[in-house]
Amino acid sequence: MTIIDLRTSDPARWKDRLNRRYRPSPDLVDRVAAIVAAVRDHGDEAVVEFAKRFDNVDLRPRDLQVTASEIDQAQRQVEPDLLDALLNSHENVTAFAKRTLRTGWLGKNSQGAAVGERFDPLQRVGIYVPAGTAPLVSTAIMTVSLASAAGVPEIVVTSPVGPDKAVHPGLLTALQLAGATSIYKLGGAQAIAALAFGTNTISSVLKIFGPGNAYVTEAKRQVFGFVGVDLLPGPSEIVVVADRTANAAWVAADLLAQAEHGANSVICLVALEEKVATGVQKEINLQVQSLARQSFLRETLEKQALTVIAKDRAQAAEIVNDFAPEHVSIAVENPDELASTIKTAGAIFLGHLSPVAAGDFLAGPSHELPTGGAAKFFSGLTADQFQRRTSIVRYDKEALEKSVPALNAFSRAERLDAHGRSVTIRLE
């Protein structure tokens, strides 16, 4: 892990290192644009061609949609312990989601007109669930359950398959449990384009949700405006702030847990003492030897791992706020006090006994969170993002009469006399 000691070095050294704003390469932009255009113009023909090229799977348009018999067969293959875990996660995520839903209200403005808001579920959404290096069973729960809790009637899911043309049984079971109404065997930028523009087989949606690789993220960026998108989540990342009370083995385990998501994951330790940094590094070196995803872990540790030694808690909070991480674990004495000064993070995990993996799988909030510094202006996925807002306005005669002077003043100032006339004609 690269080490930056801010007790002796200029803090400006880490400013650029922590700036991870989404900057797609021109080559990626062009490649994704070509895929999106092909799917928009040629529909199913392009979709199956890209599935063959990128996923090495031969599909016909009629093969794309998962059938009821495939779902039934998948459910029979799922181990009981996984099914119990899915049920527990779904229960927690749904309960949390329902508490975040917005509800309508009605009041009066200063002239007496009735004003308010109404919130309705989006009628058709698309959700992308990755399944490249591993079937992200938990992502099915952490996305589809929210749409279901919001009352979305049509929840369309796409997820890539390999040469066997089969969606992982656990993933299919999770999608069914969470409330998916249709599931398609399709991944990559071509899946996002199909959801946005539609094909003969897949009808277009109103908004697209879910994490994915660089192609998926860039495709979401390119179709934004034609459809809505939730956010642009990239590779997983974590910052752990640790002081002398932290257990070095637990901190190392949290860092490695996020590192195993992929080689582009970003892990950062903010240590409040040098011996904390040394202890965690020793534990990382020890634990990594026994973990399965060696190639991902070692590449992340070599290229995307950072240890910062901060001079005090205030500087540690400043580092976190500049980093704006997807996950931040506060492994210090009195974690609530430090957490109150952190304003830019996707999710905060408080205390020594709160592993980030619990948030990935079970706790309740969705694990789809902003990355790449986007926590400075994005929040994580919530159920209210599956709702749309409509404002409500109702005037009676008394309220309209009280409003005439102000309405006429605006219409004169903006030289829009028809606006003013549309008000006064009602009172003649």
Image (cartoon, grey):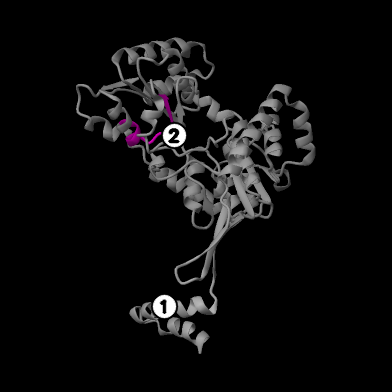
Furthest-bottom residue in this view = 428
Callout 2: few (<14), some (14-19), or many (20+) C-alpha neighbours within 10 Å?
many
The location of residue 234, given as percent across then percent down, is 46, 37
Residue highlighted by disc 2: 326
At a point 61% along the width and 50% down the height, the residue shown is 125
At a point 39% along the width and 77% down the height, the residue shown is 406
Disc 2 residue type (three-letter): Glu
Question: Based on the displayed image, in which of its 4 quarters is residue 5 positioned?
Answer: top left
Kindly tell me whether residue 176 is visible in this rendering. yes
Q: In what element is the residue under mark 1?
A: helix
Callout 1: few (<14), some (14-19), or many (20+) C-alpha neighbours within 10 Å?
some
Magenta stretch bounds: 319-330
Q: Nearer the viewer, mark 2 or mark 1?
A: 1
Instruction: Let me know if residue 329 is in the magenta part.
Output: yes
Disc 1 residue type (three-letter): Leu
The location of residue 295, given as percent across then percent down, is 48, 20
Question: Based on the displayed image, in which of its 4 quarters is residue 134 positioned?
Answer: top right
At a point 20% along the width and 24% down the height, the residue shown is 9
Q: Earlier in the sequence, mark 2 or mark 1?
A: 2
Label at residue 70: none
Q: Is residue 204 above or below residue 406?
A: above
Q: Nearer the viewer, residue 303 or 18?
A: 18
Q: In what element is the residue under mark 2?
A: loop
Q: Is residue 264 above or below residue 413?
A: above
Residue highlighted by disc 1: 407
* Residue 36 as seen in the image, left or right of residue 63: left
The location of residue 263, given as percent across then percent down, is 45, 27
Name the image quarter holding the N terminus: top left
